[in-house]
Image (spheres, rainbow, N blue to C red):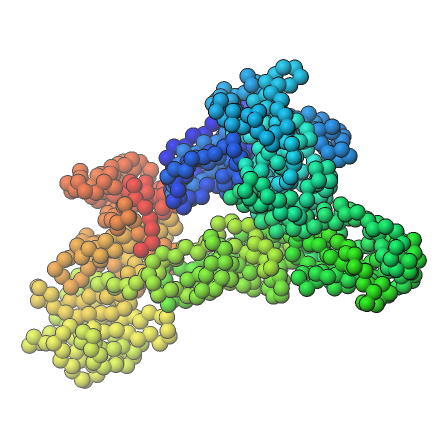
Amino acid sequence: MNNILKALSLIGFLFAVVALAPNNQEFNGLIISWQEEASSSGILQIRTRETFGWSEWMAVKRDEDHDEHDEITSTSEEIFDTLINTNKSSAFEYRVIGNGITNIHIDPIYNNAPGKRRFFAATNGPRGIPIISRQEWGADETLTFKNGEIDENNGNHNELSDSNERELFGKDDEEIERIEYTDREGRTYRWPLQYAKDIKFIVVHHTASAKDLDKPKNAIQNILYYHAVRRGWGDIGYNYLIDTEGNIYEGRKGGVGVIGGHARPVNKASVGIALLGNFEDGQISPRALDSLLILSRKLAKDHNIKLNKNIRYNGKTYEGLHGHGDNSATACPGYNIKEQLEEIRDTITYQNRSNNPLFTSRYDFRDQNRDRIIVAKAGEEKEFTIKLKNTGASAWDNKTYLMTTNSGEDRSIPRILATLAEERVESGQIGIFKGTIPQNLVSGLRLAKTRLVANGNENEIVAKEISVPIFVEGVHASYEVVRRSDPPKILQPGEKARAWIELKNTSNFTWKRAGKNKVQIGTTQDRDRKSPLFEGDRRIARLRQSSVGPGEIGRFYFYLTAPSTPGRYVEHFAPVIEGVTWMPDAGLHFDVTIEGEEKPIRVLIRDFDSSRVMISSEEKTRLYEGKKRITTIRENAQITIRKTRGKYAVKVRGTVYELQEPPRIISIPAKAGNSGILRVNNYENRPAWNPNLNDNLFEGTLEIRTLKNGKLSVINELPLERYLTGLAEVSNGDHKEKIRTIIILARSYARYHLENNSKFPNEPYDLDNDPNSTQKYLGYGLTKRSPNITQAVQDTRGMIVTYHGDPVLTPYFSQSDGRTRSAEEVWGWKDRPYLQSVNDSHCGATQLLGHGVGLSGCGATALAKQGKSAEDIIKYYYKGVEIEPR
């Protein structure tokens, strides 16, 4: 084992790609260890590069099968490890989402031993059951002996400590019949073979890995290496393993009665059976279930295990057949196996039951195929037959049927399960009963408990019960994300928004909008949590189409209502089949920030120069004195404002209003949601490239007041996001990512001064429209002719640059001479560690245009053309910053 990746102290959200082996040597498993803080919110994910590309991301979770070999002392930081079986892969990529996961250590496994392919009834398993031996699946037996050929990098795992050996292998243990320390050739076992005096339990596990299931021998070889070497046990911990095709494999060497290491509380009195796969979300295959029943039935009979009986052991009570999670704190063997254990116990108990004597009762029978399982595909009807031998003294007519006694508990099972097909079945003859299992998406094993109703007379119900196992094959519930339209990143309290996502149905059934098993989208992390963004609803999106077949694309609509409490809300979600199962969690989420009441920005139109202000609007306007409304003004009426005798004289259609406080003019839009536009008729601001344009249009409010210089001035008051759409700091024709970059920086600049009142601290405005002083603001005229700038504002809504969580000043300039300058170098600022000098040779400029601190416009253009995102560009020029909504 080589090419180990060590990643020390990795925190946050990151990616790392590792090309393994210089000769493209392929691996089929990864052993992953990591350190995790007790309060960690981090998620570790991994994927591998397979033959046809990268796999889906897989969540990495700690190994669930810990026994007394592997007790971990609880600390503030715990070290975890796990085995991930993979398809053949040449590289892996991992990522950490969140904080608290560090010291990641990944070892690839190169197990490709083919093993032999013949099957036989091995002497080291229950008689009469075909078991694939360790030799056949390619077990590396050198791993099980002391001084074997084991990777030197893992030498510290090779031997158990003396104290552990005495504890585990002591001869005075009353539960151990015998111990073998060496094999016939005198080689010493790293884990001596202990044999139990009494087997009381069967414990069911899953391996929790859904990869490499088409190559089960490789998967089992990986488990052997992981248990024997990495965990230091000296062998595989399970007694038997079952693959998805139903093949049964020998696990722990030593044969019948050998003690495994799979469930600490009951190891010395149990047999451990591991199902290959992850059954927390996945479903067991019919063949694997059949083999589990056959193997468990034989073990129960050989060891006289009472499967349904509660057995007292070491002060605790367990059922004869139970899951790993019933004796230890673990999710193993997964939700979908745990939910079926009762039916599995009942089925085996029925199959092992003795028959009654023949022909002693009037109505009696003998089940001719007690080993049957009726298998139905998800969403399809299934016809079946049951053969019963008439062992009573009387004949059955064609009114005879099988009636279920538990149909009230499970409505998917018909009350009349099957009816007799023949006209008459005499005593001693075999009758065939025919029935149909209705369509059902609820997968798994259920047991129809039935009784014979002779000749249709429910007074002649045979007391003996027939158990009929019915297995509905697992729903393959999956999807691919096609497109999505997220809600705005910033919302105001009470604001409503719509979003949608398109998903391709890659399941094996049709999605329905309505009905018992309709497909919706629900909240996750935690599942079924009430969402504050959707007025407390757990189902947050509905399917638009009435049905979406496999391969088709469905659209789900979300309708959000912003909560009243400001803050950041991250809502995770995934599709769910109601009453059946959740689809895989692909990490889908919305990230929305709810703002408090936003403080508007006030911008001085510095180049306005007149003793009067003339304003009009194509819509109705209102005149205010401070917060007091004076009058409503009709469309297109000119408003003229002067300062006379210490008062503001506002003339409207021959009427003059004299005001003590500065007048405020607000346009009233004709349609809700539109912006009111005001025109300053005597303000000239025509661009040189087109003198036909005049940028004298403004959104929001115009406030007219005299400043310290005594001149009448115009202040435009409007929301910050609308202010940004009127900025001419970047051209509408620039690269999309450069526009986004400049908008984020401009917002950060404005937000910093707005919150700190730092640019014009003793003035009644926050910024002005002079690019030499603050930022170049042209108003609504630029908004109208610059849709790309407006789109960039919408795309980045609320996003600002922060350093250690605080908003920062983000200067930028035109171009550099090959490098930017630090703030200390140009302005003597020593408290701006993010404003460092960086290489800026991207656009090839040799002349410095501007102050040189922060972002270079020329360099930003070059980086955008290279495919860098706005976030990439900003983090290049401003060191150690983050971009987050505010």
- The image shows residue 866, relative to residue 781, as above or below, that is above
Give 272 or 865, whichever is nearer the viewer: 272
Residue at image location 88% in from the left, 55% down from the top = 360
Question: Looking at the picture, how far across and down is residue 774, in whole percent?
Answer: 20, 54
Q: Which one is in front, 263 or 732?
A: 263
Q: Residue furthest bottom?
A: 654
| Nearer to me, 370 or 229 | 370
**Total number of numbered labels?**
0
Q: Residue furthest left?
A: 645
At a point 92% along the width and 53% down the height, the residue shown is 428
Relative horizontal placement of residue 612, taking residue 184 as reference (left or right): left
Residue drawn at (44%, 56%), measured in percent from left and top? 571
Report if residue 817 is visible in the image.
no
Can I make out residue 397 in this image?
Answer: yes
- Residue 427 image offset from top left, x and y in percent: 92, 56
In the picture provided, is 852 more to the left or to the right than 179? left
Q: Could you tell me residue 470's position as x and y percent?
A: 72, 53
Q: Is residue 68 above or below residue 283?
A: above
What quarter of the picture does the C terminus occupy?
bottom left
| The one of 273 and 871 positioned closer to us in this rendering | 273
Task: Decide if residue 177 is on the left or right side of residue 67.
Answer: right
Q: Please state the horizontal and vertical placement of residue 387, each as a whole percent of the image.
A: 84, 53
Q: Tell me what residue is drawn at x 69 percent, y 54 percent.
A: 446
Tell me the quarter of the picture where residue 609 sits.
bottom left
Please indicate whether residue 503 sits to the left or right of residue 570 in the image: right
| Snapshot quadrant of residue 104 | top left
